[in-house]
Amino acid sequence: MEEFATDIAKSLLGKLGSSAIKELCLAWGLEAELAPLEEKLLAINAVLMDAEKKQSQNEKIRFWLQKLRGFMYDAEDALDGFECEDLRRQVVKTTGSCSRKLRRFFSSSNKLAFRFKMGHKIKDLNERLAEIESLKSLLGLTEQTGDHSSVLPEEISEMKQSFESFSGLIGRDEDKECIINVLGEPFKVYDDHPFVIPIVGMGGLGKTALAKSVYDDGSVDAIFELKMQACVSDGFAVKQVMQKMIKSATGERCNDLEEVELKAKLEAILHGRKYLLILDDVWNEDSQKWLLLKPILSKGALGSKIIVTTRSKRVAQIMGSAGAHELSLLDQKDCLSLFYKCAFKERQKEQHPNLVEIGKEIVGKCKQIPLAVINLGTQLYGITDEREWTLVRDSETWEEKEDGILPALKISYQRLSNHLKRCLLYCSIFPKDYYFTDAILVQFWMAQGLVHQSSHPSENLEDVGIRYVRELISKCFFQDVDDLFFVLSFKMHDLVHDLASSLAQNECSILRSNNHQVFKTARHLSVVDSNSFFQALPKFPNEIERVRTLVFVTSLEEPSCRTDFEKCLSGFKHLRSLELMDACEFLPDRIGSLKELRYLNLLDNSKLKRFPKSIFKLQNLQALILGDGLEELPTDVRYLISLRLLFLTTKQKRLLEGGVGRLGSLQILSIFDCENLEYLCEDMQGLKSLRKLCIVECKNLISLPRSMKYLTTLEYLSILLCEKLDLMTIEEEQEEGFKPLNLQTLYFITLPATRAVPKQFLQGSAGSLQTFAIGDCPNIIELPECTGNLKKLQKLEIWMCPSLSERCQRETGEDWPKIAHVPQIEVDHIQWKTSFTRARRASCVLLAQIFYNSELLAVIGLKLDVSVLFRSSSFDFLSCLFVAGYLITFLQLLC
């Protein structure tokens, strides 16, 4: 990753030149020692672009860049030490005349000792940099400048719209129809149970996209009572597959259950139900693992089906009930159609025939692989400069001896700006099929210093990070994007993950049982084998300090792992990100020694009941994501003065005052799945920076606090699945003088106890609200009069609100004059439409089963093409039921 030396230098120079660092060095009397660092680094920075260009042909330059990169990371760590000390002193200072107990809690260090330690570090850094600078003149490097500007927000929006417009399958209609027909076939006595349909093909052909399209097809809903999907790229552990199936079926995370408990739970879910299961990206060629899982899957009703996607014919032989459905290369005509949809804006194709011809040549090099076509098409979207197209067509990367897809992916990667390259590569630290959420991923990037401050004064770091996410989505490096109202969910394609892992292997490594040597270079580690990891640590004592990221994919439940984890934790002095993905009952007290920790993710840890008090010493912590086992969030959380994101779930009935409400830096607060929570804290006025508030699945929440009127920075508010919450209580309790809220997005979803929309929210956001949605709130019968004052409102959605929907009907509804000015209005009785469609499809299935399953009908030779019924949108389900009933009577008479 030496190509990023310029970016790292820019970040380090920004720190060295910041007024905060200069003031701190002045306060500690170290400004004279720090000045030479900045001066030498500026001189080196001038030749970095030239060095990055020449490193592939010059081993000495590549080695020099490696030394420089190591130095810059160590320099960043040293400067972070200043910032940590400053934050610690801020906490003590802002708490004012606190007790000796509080001062002991923060155990203030000796000023002279700190100055001596930091002075020694800076002296060492100066000596190292002087040596690196002396080598520079021997390498023949010249000064260069360049533009690393990124895509503007409006361009991201256009690219995202284009991405959404071609998200469907192209050229796979026959494959889809064939698989749906197999799914619709009734169970036969000689069939395997469950019946497994393998989809086989090389990477990038669209196996997952095809399976997902089948899964989402409406006709399949009528065939199966239950649908589930699970990605199993990294191994085929039966326990993990069962966890994923249960989560898909019920939404429950079961990381705290043992394998026996998981088996019983899954069998209960499947028992007697006809299901469809997608097992995506299976690599397991060990038949014994499949034989362990198959008896559990057989608990479903006869006729249950499983679709398996795999690159391995051996997997298809082991698991398949019949011959595999082999996915062929995409027809060249379909490849061209797909490319043009990805690359051209509307009517642009006709205006640039020269680009069309170059596009044909590019597609010809993609070897009929859809993923390659999509990636390169999106890279060229909206670009009309012929030189850019020619560069892609004539790239030397096409000549590399790689699989058909990899050259295209590499070219797409190479065309990214440096900051996006770094962000993408750091995602490889997470396992394959890991589902990211945009807000949390942005915080992970921020913890590593990958998100750069925008030149737009209205944008903060979170806004910039979201732009990064959307650009990577638009260029198809992320896929399976799902809008969950308050976050976007997505994952990396497994081939993109392979590419990112290979390019980032010097810094980001997945640690398994046999690759301990990664400690020598890696600063970001994903731990798959905990025992192996802790055994390796003593062999690399000097490298432990350098590690910045730890992601534990496996559990720390074993007593030996717990002990080893606690022993080694304080050795990771510069750890910035820690994620525990599996069940963990405890956090060791030594976690308070991780002074530079900025990101702590405990989402899947339902056994973690309480925190050690030392965790509140982490003044650098910017993101805290909690699991659903926490009994109470202590008021000491107020000491986390840098916290910007908090995903909170708790067992308590009320959020305590003097805690969350004191987090003045908090930007995003998500309160989710708090089954006991009845009241929020009343001191929310302390959330002076809060921009996004999400309250989800708090079924006992009764009311919102009066202090919400002080959230004048709030831009986004979503309240979902809160059964007892009546929003009108906030209006009843508000006194006069409600301040503008500056809301831009407002969602009220599944709030059955809410009687009306509080006008306070709308009045306070009359000059800012752009998106407003009300869904499944049956007791809301009308919109307040002030709705007509929402002049900036661009989109209004209303569904499953019978009375309100009636009043908002276009032209005729009583509330239509209040909303007629809104450009995009969607008012729908979705519940009725869904019920009608499902009933029609169910009746089609009933009729089809009668035709196929009756031996008497077979005797008289009566046949019917079931697929015709599924494809017919005009088939009347009442007529279908009538015919079905008539046939049953006819058969009874024959008997």
Image (tube, helix red, strand yellow):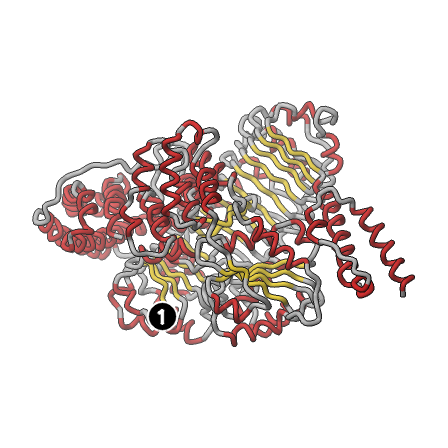
- Give the position of the C terminus as an image quadrant: bottom right
Residue with the most extreme right position = 893
Which x, y percent locates residue 47? 16, 42
Give the left or right position of residue 840, taking residue 253 as reference. Answer: right
Which x, y percent locates residue 612? 45, 62
Which x, y percent locates residue 181? 65, 56
Look at 70% across and 65% down and name the residue there.
187
Q: Which residue is mark 1?
A: 533
Look at 44% across and 57% down and name the residue there.
203
Q: Callout 1: helix, strand or loop?
A: helix
Q: Nearer the viewer, residue 636 or 861?
A: 861
Q: How many marks?
A: 1
Look at 53% across and 29% down and name the residue there.
768
Which x, y percent locates residue 875? 75, 44
Look at 87% across and 61% down and name the residue there.
891
Establish if 461 lies above or below 111: above
Establish if 299 lies above or below 143: below
- Amino acid bearing label 1: Phe
Q: Can I make out residue 666 in this image?
A: no
